[in-house]
Image (cartoon, rainbow, N blue to C red):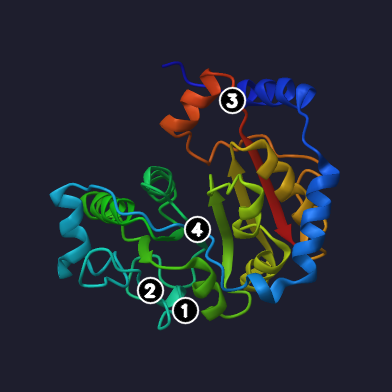
C-alpha cells in the first residue's frame, strides 16, 4: 500500500469539505441542550465495553503479575472493568524509571489495539506515556508489545477515563490524546460523545498551562462537533485559529485503518488545541 502524505490528507479534506452537508446549526442546538443539563449526563458512559477474542499471549499479559510494571491496575480476572479510584498521580508511576516523574507526560484516552500509542512511545523515549482503555484485547496486546520492546516510558490502565481525570490533580498533564473515539453516530447517543463542554472542562483542568489536547476522527459530523465545542471554550486555543482543522502531524502514526480509509477517499480530521 502506498504511504499517504499530510498533503494527500489535506487534499482529501479539501474535497470532502467542498461537498460536506453538515448542519452546523443542528450541532450548535444539540450542544446547547447538553450544556443546559450537564448533571444529567455525567454518569453516562462514553464507552461500550465489548468482549472479543484475544490470543493466549495477550490474555497472559492481563493476568500474569510479571507485567505489573506496565499494566497498572490488573483486575485479576477477565471481563472486569478496572478500578481507577486509587490512581491519583500518573507521574508517580514513572518514579523508578529512567525518565523519572518530571518528564513530559502524555495521556491517551481509548488507545484501541495500541498500535499508535506503542509507536509514539517507542519514537519519543524522552516522553512518558499513559494509555487508558476498556477493551481487554487492546490492553493485553499493548502490554505485551511494551514488555517485548522493553519500554520503560509506557504504562497501561484499564478503566473509565472520565473517572481517572476526576482523580488527577490540576495541571498534571502535558498532553491528552483522543484518537478515533467512538463517534456515537446516532442522534440519541450524541450525549455519550467524549467531547462535550462538561467533559472537556475536566481535560482542561488537568492540563498544564500551554498543554495540548489532540483529537483525530474519521467521522465528519463528530469533527465539526468537536470544532464547535472546543472553539467555544475559553480554556482552549485552536492551534490553527478558530474554525480550522489541523493538518495531520507527522508525530501521529498513520494506522492501517487510516491508510485504508484515505486510499478510499475517506476524510480524517485532526484538531490540536492548547490550554489557555
Disc on the earlier residue, 2 or 3? 2
**Foreground residue, 185 or 14?**
185
Disc on the earlier residue, 4 or 1? 1
* Mark 4 in CB contact with mark 2 (< 8 angstroms): no
Compute the Cα span from label 4 to label 2: 17 Å
User: Where 246 falls versus 51 (above or below)?
Assistant: above
Residue 273 x/y as whole percent: 71, 53
Give the mark toward the camera: 3 or 1: 3
* Mark 3 in CB contact with mark 1 (< 8 angstroms): no
Residue under pointer 2 = 93
Compute the Cα span from label 4 to label 1: 16 Å
* Mark 2 in CB contact with mark 1 (< 8 angstroms): yes
- Residue at 77%, 66% in the rendered image: 35
User: Is the residue marked by circle 2 packed among few (<14), some (14-19), or many (20+) residues within 10 Å?
Assistant: some
Residue 75 x/y as whole percent: 26, 72
Residue 92 appears in the picture as rendered: yes
From the viewer's perspective, tell me whether residue 189 is left or right of residue 25: left
Disc on the earlier residue, 3 or 1? 1
Residue under pointer 3 = 266
Disc on the earlier residue, 4 or 2? 2
* Mark 2 in CB contact with mark 3 (< 8 angstroms): no
Give the mark toward the camera: 4 or 1: 4
Residue under pointer 4 = 109
Residue 251 x/y as whole percent: 53, 41
Compute the Cα span from label 2 to label 1: 7 Å
Point out which mark residue 89 bears: 1
Residue 44 x/y as whole percent: 56, 68
Give the mark toward the camera: 4 or 2: 4
Q: Quadrant of residue 193?
A: bottom right
**Foreground residue, 162 or 249?**
162
**Foreground residue, 193 or 164?**
193
User: Where 266 falls versus 53 (above or below)?
Assistant: above
Amino acid at each position: 500500500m502506498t504511504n499517504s502524505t499530510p498533503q494527500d490528507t489535506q487534499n482529501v479534506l479539501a474535497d470532502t469539505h467542498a461537498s460536506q452537508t453538515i448542519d452546523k446549526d443542528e450541532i450548535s442546538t444539540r450542544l446547547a441542550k447538553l450544556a443546559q443539563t450537564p448533571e444529567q449526563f455525567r454518569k453516562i458512559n462514553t464507552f461500550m465495553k465489548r468482549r472479543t477474542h484475544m490470543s493466549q499471549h495477550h490474555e497472559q499479559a492481563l493476568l500474569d503479575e510479571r507485567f505489573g510494571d506496565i499494566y497498572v491496575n490488573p483486575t485479576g480476572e477477565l471481563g472486569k472493568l478496572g478500578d481507577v479510584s486509587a490512581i491519583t498521580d500518573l507521574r508517580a508511576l514513572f518514579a523508578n524509571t529512567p525518565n523519572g516523574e518530571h518528564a513530559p507526560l502524555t495521556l491517551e484516552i481509548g488507545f484501541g489495539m495500541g498500535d499508535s500509542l506503542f509507536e509514539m512511545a517507542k519514537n519519543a523515549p524522552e516522553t512518558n506515556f499513559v494509555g487508558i482503555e476498556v477493551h481487554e484485547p487492546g490492553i493485553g496486546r499493548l502490554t505485551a508489545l511494551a514488555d517485548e520492546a522493553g519500554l520503560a516510558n509506557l504504562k497501561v490502565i484499564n478503566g473509565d477515563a472520565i473517572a481517572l481525570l476526576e482523580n488527577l490533580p490540576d495541571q498534571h498533564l502535558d498532553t491528552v490524546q483522543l484518537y478515533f473515539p467512538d463517534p456515537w453516530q446516532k442522534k440519541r447517543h450524541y450525549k455519550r460523545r467524549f467531547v462535550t463542554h462538561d467533559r472537556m472542562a475536566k481535560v482542561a483542568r488537568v492540563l498544564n498551562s500551554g498543554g495540548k489536547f489532540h483529537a483525530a476522527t474519521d467521522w465528519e459530523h463528530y469533527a465539526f462537533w468537536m470544532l464547535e465545542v472546543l472553539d467555544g471554550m475559553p480554556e482552549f486555543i485552536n492551534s490553527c485559529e478558530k474554525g480550522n482543522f489541523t493538518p495531520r502531524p507527522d508525530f501521529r502514526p498513520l494506522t492501517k485503518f487510516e491508510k485504508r480509509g484515505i486510499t478510499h477517499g475517506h476524510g480524517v480530521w485532526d484538531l490540536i488545541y492548547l490550554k489557555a
